[in-house]
Image: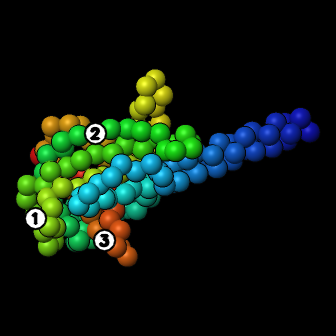
Amino acid sequence: MKNKYRICTVFLFFISAVLLISSSACTSEPSGTPSTGEKIVVSQSGGAGLLIQECSDRSYITETADYIVEGTVEKVESKWNDDKTGIFTYTDLKIENYVKGTPFTQNELQIVTPGGTVGDISQWVEDQPILHEGTQVRIYFKEENGEFAIVCGHFGVEER
């Protein structure tokens, strides 16, 4: 019984350490962000969409979004952050239509999501949209305190 308790304690400690390390790698801002010029940067963090029951309801996503845009994914590039603790994917989107929200001066967005593949190493972060060059998409995002985020993670992105 004592050994069983000790094994469970070690296992729980190991799982806690893994979760702590992976969450800090996923949430630490990339410090080597490519220059975006006039592009609006939409940043994503860990997977909140799976935790919010309403995210499966399209009307909730539509109502929550300050902006709904349609466009084409022009470029997708994954890079390590400066201290090599996490991979981030930078996706450039050419906006072709504003369904909701006041148009920006430039019709370009850069979406930054945690996770991606660099060389032979991949980092997967739950609930993140995965976008591919040439794909036409509709994106639902909101603005809070001057920062933009996709509503409900991958639920806030639709391929058209």
Badge number at residue 121: none
Mark 2 Cα shell of 10 Å, populated few (<14), some (14-19), many (≥20) = some
**Which of the marked residues, 1 or 2, is nearer the chain's N terminus?**
2
Mark 3 Cα shell of 10 Å, populated few (<14), some (14-19), many (≥20) = some
Please say if 53 is above or below 132: below
Q: Depth check: 139 or 38 in front? A: 38
* Residue 46, x across and y down, in percent: 46, 53
Which residue is denoted by mark 3 in the rendering?
143
Q: Foreground mark, 2 or 3?
A: 2
Which residue is denoted by mark 2 in the rendering?
76
- Residue type at the position of mark 3: Glu
Which residue occupies 23% across, 61% down? Answer: 38
Q: Going by the picture, which residue comes out furthest to the left?
A: 97
Proximity of marks 3 and 1: CB atoms separated by less than 8 Å: no
Q: Taking the image as drawn, is residue 40 in sight?
A: yes
Please say if 8 is above or below 67: above
The alpha-carbon separation of the residues under discs 1 and 2 comes to 23 Å
**Which of the marked residues, 3 or 1, is nearer the chain's N terminus?**
1
* Placement of the N terminus among the 4 image quadrants: top right
The alpha-carbon separation of the residues under discs 2 and 3 comes to 23 Å
Proximity of marks 2 and 3: CB atoms separated by less than 8 Å: no
Which residue occupies 20% across, 37% down? Answer: 133
Q: Taking the image as drawn, is residue 152 in sight?
A: no
- Residue type at the position of mark 1: Val
- Residue type at the position of mark 2: Val
Which residue is denoted by mark 1 in the rendering?
99
* Residue 60, x across and y down, in percent: 26, 67
Which residue occupies 28% across, 39% down? Answer: 76
Residue at disc 3, secondary structure: strand
Q: Going by the picture, which residue comes out furthest to the right?
A: 2
